Image: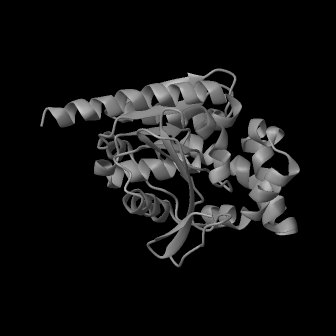
Amino acid sequence: MPAIAVRDTTIYYEQAGQGPALLFIHGMCGDARVWAGQAGRLAGRFSCVSFDRRGHTRSAPGTEPESVATHAADAAALIEALELARPVVVGSSGGARIAVELARTRPGLLAGAVFSEPPIFTLDPAAGQAFMTEVAAVVRPAAQTGGPPAAVDAFFPLVCPGLWSQLDQAAKDRYRANGPMMLAEFAGPPYQLGLNDAAGIAVPSLVIAGTESHPALRAIAATLARALPDARLVQLAGSGHVTYAERPDQFAEAVAAFATEVTSRQHTQATHI
């Protein structure tokens, strides 16, 4: 089982394929296995690296408090420890929010970034407040009566029904086991990113949204794409929030086209130095 010491913790990771590197960051309650379908589609052209975020499944929680900044620092340290040569980071949901922070704080590590519906509520406070009010109304009472597993069972059918309907009981149990990390994330400091902050992220970016996702999450994705200086927005028709699982072929095609473009651009720039 490959694991590597990263900062104050030990991170489990998986690697498949050869070529330019893609670093996948999972969302709430997930782990490296959620990216298996994408790795299967992309490993013929790319080196695909996925990992369990600290406190999830096979990675130790470490000692630092739960925050987006903590997870972004872990991702940066993992890139350096594995000696990945300027990967394209690919994040979904909470993982995309971490990828945004990584691109903001360590742009020199990356060739590009793919953000699939990052829940950055400060980019659209009204939409974010409405979303969190809706989530809290079902998650809070479930957590109070049934603990983290019940909170997971309340959250995912509401926000990610397309994903949740695909998972068998063993996969759902893995999400439930990571429920304490979900509650810690909700209890942690809200991630702060304003439009001016986004405008300063120069990393070439692809923002992905599902046409059937929650309106607040779609609105935030569109706002982020407009604010980033070098970004485009791709909407996957018929997909909900978890685009890589609900429209896996289209997601992989979009990632492959974007990663090929930005890594080629990187190579061209290097040869002219």
Q: Which residue corresponds to the image point at 77% horizontal and 43% vertical from the top-left?
A: 158
Quadrant in the picture for the C terminus: top left
Judged left or right of residue 40, residue 108 is left
Do we see residue 2 in this rendering?
Answer: yes
Q: Which residue corresponds to the image point at 68% horizontal and 50% vertical from the top-left?
A: 133
Judged left or right of residue 218, residue 238 is right
- 114 lies above or below 129: above
Do we see residue 141 in this rendering?
Answer: no
Q: Could you say where residue 265 lies in the image, as x and y percent from the top left?
A: 28, 29
Quadrant in the picture for the N terminus: bottom right
Which one is nearer the viewer's eye here, 67 or 99? 99
Q: Could you say where residue 155 lies in the image, as x and y percent from the top left?
A: 76, 51
Which one is nearer the viewer's eye here, 197 or 262? 262
Q: How many marks?
A: 0
Q: Could you say where residue 220 lies in the image, as x and y percent from the top left?
A: 52, 37
Q: Which residue corresponds to the image point at 54% horizontal and 25% vertical from the top-left?
A: 253
